[in-house]
Image (spheres, rainbow, N blue to C red):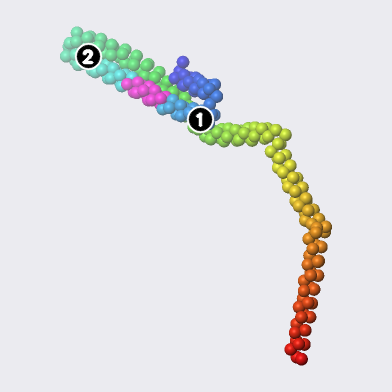
């Protein structure tokens, strides 16, 4: 199983585990994005290690090829000096170094191809994680809206038979009735109460008193003039 397939499996496992615990989707999404970015960092480190291996293989291939070239030059010098025995030994060493160089070259080329695929997968993974980060806020907004709608519906459903609103209507009708009764009582008091009759008699008494005062004053003036 490739490293990226293992990472994808891990992502799915993390999401399924979080959802199975019935946690807050907002917390889950935030944590999943954090986990994704942590895995991305880990993947980059693994790709960097693979690149380091590729460079090391390239260096080993170059060193082995250079060593083979050196032994061939030594074989040439030995022949020039009529040392065929040394030339034979040098060529043997050259062949060994060249064989090792060829093996390193094969491994280096395979590693180089693998690095190219790993980089492609890494770029794809990074794009998906960036897209997930962008979608996270939208998903959280949808979750919050759904939660608010659910709470509103639950609140409305909790008001059985609209009892709260019915209470308001009953109180309004009761207050209207009380006001009507108060108005009727005031009207009855004005039209049929004893206070009106007493007020009329009081007025008559008040008028008689003034007339008496006026007659007394006239009598006083008549006495003073005699």
Q: Quadrant of residue 154?
A: top right
Q: Residue furthest bottom?
A: 226
Q: Residue 142: tell me if it is visible.
A: no
Q: Position of residue 25 (x, y in %)?
A: 54, 29
Lateral position of residue 28 relative to residue 201, left or right: left
Q: Secondary structure at mark 2?
A: helix
Question: Which residue is identified by label 2?
Answer: 75
Q: Secondary structure at mark 1?
A: helix
Q: Position of residue 90 (x, y in %)?
A: 22, 12
Which image quadrant: the C terminus? bottom right
Q: Residue at x 39, y 23 (%)?
A: 46
| C-alpha distance separating marks 2 and 1 | 72 Å
Q: Is residue 16 magenta?
A: no
Question: Which residues are drawn in magenta?
Answer: 42-56
Dot 1, crowdedness within 10 Å: few (<14), some or many (≥20)? few
Q: Position of residue 51 (x, y in %)?
A: 37, 24
Question: Which residue is identified by label 1?
Answer: 27
Q: Residue 143: tell me if it is visible.
A: yes
Dot 2, crowdedness within 10 Å: few (<14), some or many (≥20)? many
Residue 62 numbered tag: none
Q: Are marks 2 and 1 in contact (CB under 8 Å)?
A: no
């Amino acid at each position: 199983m490739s490293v990226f397939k293992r990472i994808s499996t891990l992502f799915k496992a993390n999401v399924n585990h979080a959802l199975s615990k019935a946690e807050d989707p907002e917390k889950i999404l935030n944590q999943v994005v954090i986990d994704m970015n942590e895995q991305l960092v880990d993947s980059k480190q693994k790709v960097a290690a693979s690149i380091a291996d590729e460079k090391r293989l390239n260096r080993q291939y170059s060193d082995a090829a250079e060593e083979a070239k050196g032994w061939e030059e030594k074989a040439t010098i030995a022949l020039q000096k009529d040392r065929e025995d040394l030339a034979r030994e040098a060529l043997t060493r050259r062949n060994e170094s060249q064989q090792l160089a060829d093996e390193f070259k094969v491994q280096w080329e395979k590693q180089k191809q693998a690095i190219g695929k790993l980089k492609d997968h890494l770029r794809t993974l990074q794009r998906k994680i960036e897209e997930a980060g962008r979608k996270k806020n939208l998903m959280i907004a949808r979750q919050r809206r759904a939660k608010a709608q659910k709470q509103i519906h639950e609140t409305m459903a909790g008001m059985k038979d609209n009892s709260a609103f019915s209470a308001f209507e009953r109180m309004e009708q009761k207050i209207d009735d009380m006001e009507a009764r108060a108005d009727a009582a005031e009207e009855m008091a004005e039209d049929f109460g004893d206070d009106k009759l007493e007020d009329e008699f009081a007025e008559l008494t008040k008028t008689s008193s003034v007339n008496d005062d006026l007659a007394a004053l006239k009598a006083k003036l008549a006495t003073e003039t005699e």
